[in-house]
Image: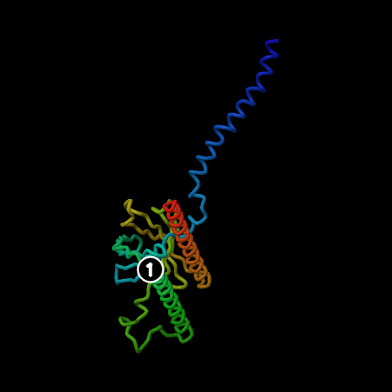
Amino acid sequence: MSSDKSINRFPNCYYFLKRYWQSEFHSKLCRITRKYFHNRLDPFNLCPRTILFWFFIPPYRAIGISILDLQRIAVYGRQQIEPNQTIYLMFKILELNSPIPLTLLIMFASLGLVLTDGANKIVQAVRSEYENIVPTDESVTPSLNPFNLTPRMSIYFPIIDDHTSIGFLTIDLRHIEFSIKQSLEPNENIKSLIRFIDIYAPFPLQLGIMFLSVGLFLCGIIFKFILSLNQELLDEIRCSL
């Protein structure tokens, strides 16, 4: 009889543990999982956080305009650390709150200058190939060449939150440099850039990468702008209540 009672107790223990799992532990585990992976599973976290346009100051420096979102622009300085152009140090000079039209004007004007410079290099390369001459302009000296003032575009995709990211710098429509950007302090005012690979790709492929990256960046900042508007609307409703 005792053995029969012990056998009958096992199903009761099983159902009790199952009920406890479903009511207590499983719900807590789901809440913890949702809380931990809420932001990490957001597909908009894959969008670039910023887009940078570098205006070079020969031989080792550059000034960068960083588009952070539709209403924030930052200005960075970049210093080359070693002669072989592998390690750079960038630091934030200032950050501005700008109107949305001004931000869009700066971004698309800089992007247009990047594409114009790339198209000019393609034209010069084609002329050099078919005319078998060095691409020079007799009417304009190299020091006064206006294309020396055109920027280069750089976009970084986040890897570990916002402190580490990987991205590329467009040299022209064929030459692209990949580098890792690492924040050196918590407030992200000083960052390091480490270039690790150069790629020479067909210019249609590079144009596709550039426009895809810019499109993802625009999707990300528009999404953040909509979230901020929704939060402001909720705050107004709470205040009115």
Q: Residue 86 in the image: state x and y as whole percent.
A: 36, 61
Q: How is the image coloured?
A: rainbow
Q: How many marks?
A: 1
Q: Residue at x 41, y 73 (%)?
A: 105
Q: Which residue is mark 1?
A: 99
Pick out the residue farthest to the bottom.
139
* Looking at the image, residue 15 lies above or below residue 165: above
Pick out the residue farthest to the front.
241
Check the picture and name the quadrant holding the N terminus: top right
For label 1, count other residues whose C-alpha is less than 10 Å away and answer few (under 14), some (14-19) or many (20+): few
Quarter of image, res 167: bottom left
* Looking at the image, residue 72 lies above or below residue 27: below
Q: Is residue 197 visible?
A: no
Q: Nearer the viewer, residue 211 or 60?
A: 211
Quarter of image, res 171: bottom left
Is disc 1 placed on a helix, strand or loop? loop
Q: Residue 78 in the image: state x and y as whole percent.
A: 31, 64
* Looking at the image, residue 156 lies above or below residue 23: below
Q: Is residue 213 visible?
A: yes
Q: Nearer the viewer, residue 193 or 233?
A: 233
Quarter of image, res 139: bottom left
Q: Residue at x 39, y 66 (%)?
A: 52
Q: Residue 239 in the image: state x and y as whole percent.
A: 41, 52
Identity of the amino acid at label 1? Pro
Q: Nearer the viewer, residue 192 or 32?
A: 32
